[in-house]
Image (tube, coloured by chain):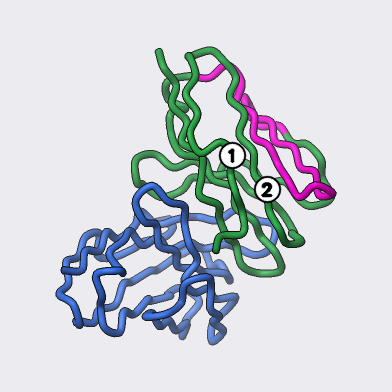
Amino acid sequence: SQQGEEDPQALSIQEGENATMNCSYKTSINNLQWYRQNSGRGLVHLILIRSNEREKHSGRLRVTLDTSKKSSSLLITASRAADTASYFCGIQGAQKLVFGQGTRLTINP
Amino acid sequence: NAGVTQTPKFQVLKTGQSMTLQCAQDMNHEYMSWYRQDPGMGLRLIHYSVGAGITDQGEVPNGYNVSRSTTEDFPLRLLSAAPSQTSVYFCASIEGVNTEAFFGQGTRLTVV
């Protein structure tokens, strides 16, 4: 079974709106990472947040981490059509990196 | 730098055949991993390695073998292919803990 769970499984919004997706996990972590995947291609790294960090920003992306609740959220502001993709959270413990099932985000023009 | 290179990109096997999926990275990363992704699903970890000569099982290791004789290469062997192994396989490399993973473009495998 996968150690991360994303919510929602699918999200459809209008261009320009903000998109929020969540990730919950069960084990202790060194860091949590968010990735984007376009149409069956390889995953592309977006942002990494360490277990001792609570919030990170990168351009239009904002990631929060609450280790007490074992959860993280990814916020994409001012969405664009090019943001249409699947988004995955990766959980890295001592060594291995495991992923959840992802959120399928669709941005409607 | 080429990054992470996977070969082949596509493969069709008959049930019971064996084959090796190749993965090579030129970034001198210590960590390498193999994942499979089924339609509409996330990535499930098959095997991973934290350095040459060191491998360990992931979430779905049955039916697969790996070895890590060099830092650069991490081949995945299917011992006796089954239709349930039809999937897209991704290889990834990571420099170490608290660093990002770099993914190959994937190998699309069909077992008939």
Q: Is residue A66 magenta?
A: yes
Picture layout, residue B104 above or below residue B40 = below
Amino acid beneath label 1: Asp
Query: Which residue corresponds to mark 2?
Result: A24
Neighbor class of circle 2 (other Cα within 10 Å; few <14, some 14-19, many 20+) is many
Q: Which mark is residue A7?
A: 1
Magenta-highlighted residues: A57-79
Horizontal relation, residue A48 to residue B109: left or right = right
The quadrant of the rendering that contains the N terminus of chain B is bottom left
Q: Going 26% across and 75% down the picture, which residue do you hit?
A: B82
Horizontal relation, residue A59 to residue B66: left or right = right
Q: Which mark is residue A27?
A: none
The tint of chain B in the picture is blue
Q: Main secondary structure of the magenta part?
A: strand
Picture layout, residue A95 above or below residue A107 = below
Q: Residue B58 versus residue B19: which sits nearer the camera?
A: B58
Quadrant of residue B34 within the rendered picture:
bottom left
Q: Do the numbered discs 1 and 2 sit on residues whose CB atoms are within 8 Å?
A: yes
The tint of chain A in the picture is green
